[in-house]
Structure formats: structure tokens, C-alpha cells
């Protein structure tokens, strides 16, 4: 659906204003789709992102700043996210013996099992969201978004 129809607005100052509104609107639309897919697993998209980061670093543990650097949502409270995931048994936090200020964070087997269960759900969700794009269009969109970020 066209942005004009979604926002019930027929005119924009220029194409640059339209593209900025389109990115913001589309980002929210995608986030809702992701939240819906994760809801039945009692995970937020930020918690899911932390688990994926930890799976990707495995078997190496990460500290909190490593996780924050890699997060898609840089404004997330990583400390709170990690604690909620620890309470669910999806990751461990171990204080380093040599440096008490350093905390090593690792995904648990339960976390790995949850991600294995989530992988096909997220893949299906991604295909649903991008169903109107060809592979070439997805590639072009990726290039344009990379270019936008400079």
C-alpha cells in the first residue's frame, strides 16, 4: 500500500520528506510483524537480538559492552535485557575471577533450543513481510539503505 494511503496524506514537502516518513512508517510496520511472531515465545525483539548475538559468538562469552555494540537497537537497556533473559534461564552471567568488574555472558542450551524453535518462525515472518519483493529488488533495497547510512 502506498504511504499516502497509509498516512491519509496526499502531499509531502518533497521526495526526501516522503522517503524519511516512509522509512519510519515501514520500520514500525516491520517491528509489529516481528513482535507478533515473538509474542507467543514471551520475547521482545531486543531480547531475541541479544540471544542471536550470543549464539553468533558461541563458544566465546561476551561482556555487556560487546553485546551493546552489536545490538540493532542501540537505545536498548542491555543490562535489563540480559537480566530478564538470565531469569528465564536463556543465558548465564558469570563474574570474571581475574577482573571482578568484567561479567561474561553466554547463551545456555535452553536459549539455543529456543532459537532453534524460533528460526523457522522468524524465517516465515521474514518471507511474509518481504513477499512483494523479488530477490533483485531486495538486493537493490539493501544497497540503497546501506547508501543512506553512508
Image (cartoon, grey):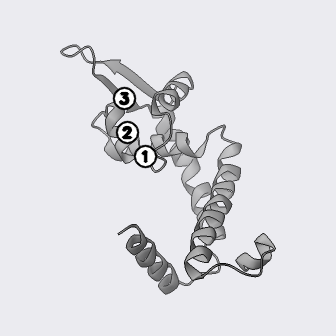
Q: How crowded is mark 2: few (under 14 residues within 10 Å), some or many (20 or more)?
A: many
> Picture quarter containing residue 99?
top left
Residue hosting label 1: 71
Q: Where is residue 51 in the image (x, y as percent from the top left)?
A: 47, 41
- Where is residue 92 shown, x and y percent of the image? 42, 24
Tag 1: Cα neighbours inside 10 Å, few (<14), some, or many (≥20)? some
Q: Where does label 3 land, which residue?
A: 105
The residue at 64%/80% (across/down) is 132
Residue beneath the point at 39% across and 71% down: 146
Element carrying mark 1: loop
- What residue does disc 2 label? 67
- Nearest to the eye among marks 3 and 2: give it: 2
Mark 3 and mark 2 residues within 8 Å of each other at the beta carbon:
yes
Name the foreground residue: 36 vs 120.
36
Number of numbered callouts drawn: 3
Which is more foreground, mark 3 or mark 1?
1
User: In this rendering, would 25 be left or right of 111?
Assistant: right
Identify the element where label 3 is drawn. Answer: strand
> Would you say the residues marked 2 and 1 are in contact, meaning their CB atoms lie under 8 Å apart?
yes
Q: In which quadrant will I find the N terminus?
A: bottom right
With respect to residue 112, does 123 lie above or below?
below
Rendered position, 122 above or below 71: below
Estimate the spatial distance between the alpha carbons at disc 3 and disc 2, rounded to whole Å: 9 Å
**In the rendering, at what x and y percent does residue 52 appear?**
45, 46
Residue 122 visible: yes
Amino acid at each position: 500500500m502506498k504511504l499516502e494511503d497509509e498516512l491519509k496524506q496526499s502531499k509531502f514537502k518533497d521526495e526526501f520528506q516522503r522517503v524519511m516518513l516512509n522509512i519510519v512508517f515501514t520500520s514500525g510496520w516491520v517491528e509489529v510483524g516481528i513482535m507478533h511472531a515473538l509474542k507467543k515465545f514471551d520475547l521482545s525483539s531486543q531480547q531475541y537480538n541479544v540471544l542471536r548475538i550470543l549464539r553468533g559468538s558461541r563458544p566465546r562469552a561476551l561482556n555487556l559492552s560487546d553485546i551493546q555494540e552489536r545490538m540493532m537497537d542501540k537505545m536498548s537497556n542491555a543490562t535489563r535485557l540480559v537480566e530478564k533473559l538470565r531469569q528465564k534461564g536463556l543465558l548465564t552471567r558469570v563474574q570474571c575471577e581475574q577482573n571482578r568488574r568484567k561479567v561474561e555472558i553466554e547463551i545456555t542450551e535452553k536459549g539455543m533450543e529456543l532459537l532453534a524453535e524460533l528460526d523457522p518462525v522468524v524465517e516465515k515472518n521474514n518471507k511474509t513481510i518481504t513477499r512483494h519483493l523479488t530477490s533483485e529488488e531486495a538486493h537493490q533495497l539493501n544497497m540503497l539503505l546501506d547508501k543512506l547510512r553512508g
